[in-house]
């Protein structure tokens, strides 16, 4: 992604000193600050506190967290402790478990003396694969935007929800990868950016798009249906925290409502989904995916910048009022027109056929 006209990634490693660096997303969009992670515990805290967000980025961070643990303790006990600690940080995004399972498969058979180097190398592979995967998703999604531009010969309006951008991955993003590629290719594109309460991740999407120079408009969550009714949305592209084998998608709370509005207004609804976000063990996502309860603080408080330039939390609701804060919802496959993967675009019913080997693994 472009930040201050320079290419940056949301996470990177210092291979010489064996440390990891992230952009602290709890401070964005007001303050751009790097944070160094030197231990598994620091990386786990970064995931838990949402300093890193987005299923793909959580997976990459978890892989490096294991590598940081192996740097100081390569025993079976340390490996198992890292696995358990990191697995408990965020329950819904499947990339977390996917990355941890992969690290464990690579490291468990090795002699303890070989684990530190192998862990660092494998985490690096996962990071580079994420970049390549998102680039492939971008190319397939670009074809959709190009076809719409040829058809309408005007700027293409895309609505997205939450942040499925470069900040949610290592680079490019999932839902935003086709948008960045279209913009860079000279296809005029405009993005309706959902605010995505309660954590307002839309602020991150708007910040990214502004830095990259992509035209966009920030809207409240409840405005999406209005713009669809008035013919101002050509397609919806969202990211995915976990997809089922039949094409249901779990994503940030509010995604389901966007899918319903899109269906009612004949607006195609696409889910940008790397294969690492597909849980082949899940059939019925609504019944089987654990939905994270984020607690009440996010609803009772808003983060913003005060007149004196400091970023603060502001109370908007008294503690006496009870709240419910599910972090995600499930959009059934019947509302999804297509799933954009690194291998191409599939209708939900054809998803397993696109991944014949992976879909049969237990």
Image (cartoon, rainbow, N blue to C red):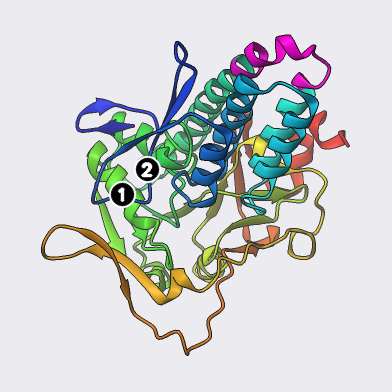
Assign a secondary structure to mark 1: loop
Callout 2 crowding tier (Cα within 10 Å): few <14, some 14–19, many ≥20? many
- Residue 116 appears in the picture as rendered: yes
Outermost left residue: 308
Tell whether 271 sits left or right of 110.
left
Nearest the eye: 39 or 263: 39
Nearest the eye: 14 or 243: 14
Quadrant including the N terminus: top left
Q: Which residue is mark 1?
A: 28
271 in the magenta segment: no
Q: Residue 230 at what x, y percent from top left?
A: 35, 71
Asked if 8 appears above or below 17 in the picture, the reply is below
- Residue at (26% x, 58% y) in the render: 217
Q: Residue 22 at what x, y percent from top left?
A: 41, 34
- Residue at (14% x, 57% y) in the render: 309
Tell whether 222 sits left or right of 337.
left
- Residue at (64% x, 40% y) in the render: 95
Quadrant including the C terminus: top right
Disc 1 and disc 2 in contact, CB within 8 angstroms: yes
- Residue at (60% x, 20% y) in the render: 71
Q: CA distance from mark 1 to mark 2?
A: 7 Å
Asked if 298 appears above or below 135 in the picture, the reply is below
Q: In the rendered structure, which segment of residues is drawn in magenta?
A: 106-120
Asked if 101 appears above or below 291 in the picture, the reply is above
Kindly identify which numbered label has been placed on residue 24. Answer: 2
């Amino acid at each position: 992604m472009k930040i201050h006209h320079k290419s940056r990634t949301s996470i990177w490693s210092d291979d010489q000193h064996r440390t990891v660096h992230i952009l602290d997303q709890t401070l964005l969009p007001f303050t751009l600050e790097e944070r160094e992670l030197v231990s598994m515990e620091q990386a786990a805290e970064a995931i838990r506190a949402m300093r890193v967000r987005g299923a793909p980025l959580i997976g990459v961070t978890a892989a490096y967290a294991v590598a940081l643990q192996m740097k100081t303790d390569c025993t079976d006990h340390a490996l198992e402790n890292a696995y358990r600690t990191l697995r408990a940080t965020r329950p819904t995004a499947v990339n977390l478990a996917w990355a941890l399972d992969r690290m464990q498969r690579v490291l468990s058979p090795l002699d303890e003396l070989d684990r530190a180097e192998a862990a660092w190398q494998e985490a690096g592979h996962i990071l580079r694969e994420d970049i390549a995967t998102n680039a492939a998703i971008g190319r397939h999604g670009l074809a959709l935007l190009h076809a719409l531009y040829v058809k309408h010969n005007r700027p293409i309006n895309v609505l997205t929800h939450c942040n499925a951008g470069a900040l949610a991955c290592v680079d490019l993003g999932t839902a935003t990868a086709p948008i960045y590629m279209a913009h860079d290719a000279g296809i005029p594109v405009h993005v309706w950016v959902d605010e995505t309460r309660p954590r307002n991740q839309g602020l991150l999407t708007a910040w990214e798009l502004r830095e990259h120079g992509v035209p966009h408009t920030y809207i409240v969550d409840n405005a999406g249906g209005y713009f669809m009714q008035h013919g101002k949305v050509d397609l919806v592209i969202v990211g995915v925290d976990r997809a089922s084998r039949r094409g249901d998608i779990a994503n940030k709370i509010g995604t389901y409502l966007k899918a319903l509005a899109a269906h009612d207004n004949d607006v195609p609804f696409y889910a940008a989904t790397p294969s690492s976000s597909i849980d082949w063990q899940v059939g019925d996502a609504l019944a089987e995916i654990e939905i994270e309860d984020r607690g009440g603080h996010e609803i009772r408080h808003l983060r913003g910048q005060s007149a004196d330039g400091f970023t603060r939390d502001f109370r908007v609701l008294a503690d006496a009022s009870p709240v419910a804060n599910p972090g995600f919802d499930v959009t059934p496959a019947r509302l999804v027109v297509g799933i954009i993967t690194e291998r191409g675009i599939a209708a939900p019913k054809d998803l397993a056929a696109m991944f014949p080997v992976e879909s049969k693994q237990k």
